[in-house]
Amino acid sequence: MAFVPDYRRYSVAFLAVASTALMFWFGTGLNPWWPLLWFAPLPVLLFASRSTVWGAAFTAALSWLLGSLNLLYYWYYVNGGIGEAPASIRVLLLFALAGGLFRAALVFALAVLLFRALLRRGAWWTALLAFPATWVSFEYLLNVISVHGTFGSLSYSQLNFLPFLQLASLTGPWGMSFLVLLFPATLAIGLHLRNVAPKQAFRVVSAGLVVIVLVLVFGALRLTQRTAAQQVKVGLVASDLPANVNVAHEGPDTARLFRDYAAKAESLADRGAQVIVLPEKLGVVVDPDTKSVDALFQSLADKTVVDIVVGLVHVSPPVKYN
């Protein structure tokens, strides 16, 4: 029997990957449009509920991987300066970066597969919780073992959604990531059951949405509360250097840059700033040169009576700290 490709299934898989990847791309990153992330997993979850195991796994992993590439420029040029490293180091760093992306894609695929397996067995309530719980467990584990802490958590995409952001006061980022993924799981189960078990679909969707609505009501009420908090005037200093040259090299370059920033910080203090914040990773400082940097800003803090937050790359061989 001749093999006939199932073009309809491939087309649906392509649409699922494209739509989920695009929503992940624009719903996460440095300037996310937060509503998109609430719907991003939905196409893949719907596809997985009706596809083979391998089809679901490949679709989920590929969509996450493609959506995560929105930070490639940041990682390559800004955060780690990979683009400026020697060729041999660049290859190693790219492999490390690729490993992180593939690891997250694998966990997302496993979460989708667990959701699919439970859904097809009729364990709808467990499927509803298992999908977000798997991902949040991964986020928490990274927070424990990684030097980057909660970096990469889906919760950071919701910083402009102020009523929802209030949940962090109770659960930290974990509750936020959980509910962001609970929402598409709720919709996917409802759409999957709408014809075969409409009453059950209604119960699952109602339960999931009620939880989210209650969280938003809590957040809205919390935002209306007036607190007698002390106002603090904060000064921010940043240069207009291109993103790929924002980390000064060790030695004279870093020393000159810190002196320039110290002068700007003193100017802000004269204008009434009580706390002054400088950018992350201004320059590279290698022990024992940190003593001179500490002395520069400590004397400025003593003189102006302000708190100064300084970001630098502190190299204490063989360890490098951000």
Image: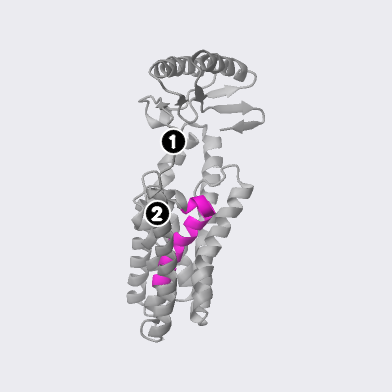
Helix, strand or loop: magenta stretch: helix
Image position of 187 with respect to 283: above or below? below
Residue at left offset 45%, top offset 37%: 229
Is the C terminus in the top left, top right, bottom left or bottom right quadrant?
Answer: top right
Q: Position of residue 172 (x, y in %)?
A: 53, 51
Image color mode: one colour
Q: Secondary structure at mark 1?
A: helix
Between 123 and 209, the one nearer to me in the picture: 209
Q: Residue furthest right?
A: 318
Residue 187 sits in quarter:
bottom left
Q: Secondary structure at mark 2?
A: helix
Q: Between disc 2 and disc 1, whose residue precedes? A: 1
Image position of 35 with respect to 16: above or below? above
The residue where tag 1 is placed is: 77
Q: Is residue 176 magenta?
A: yes
The amino acid type found where label 2 is placed reads Leu
The Cα atoms of the two marked residues, 2 and 1, are separated by 42 Å
The residue where tag 2 is placed is: 221
Q: Position of residue 226 (x, y in %)?
A: 40, 44
Residue 136 sits in quarter:
bottom right
Residue at left offset 51%, top offset 24%: 307
Which label sits in the foreground, 2 or 1?
A: 2
Determine whether label 2 and label 1 are within 8 Å by CB: no
Q: Which portion, as a residue range, is magenta?
A: 167-187
Residue at left offset 43%, top offset 82%: 200
Is disc 2 surrounded by few (<14), some (14 to 19) or many (20+) residues within 10 Å?
A: few
Between 79 and 115, the one nearer to me in the picture: 115
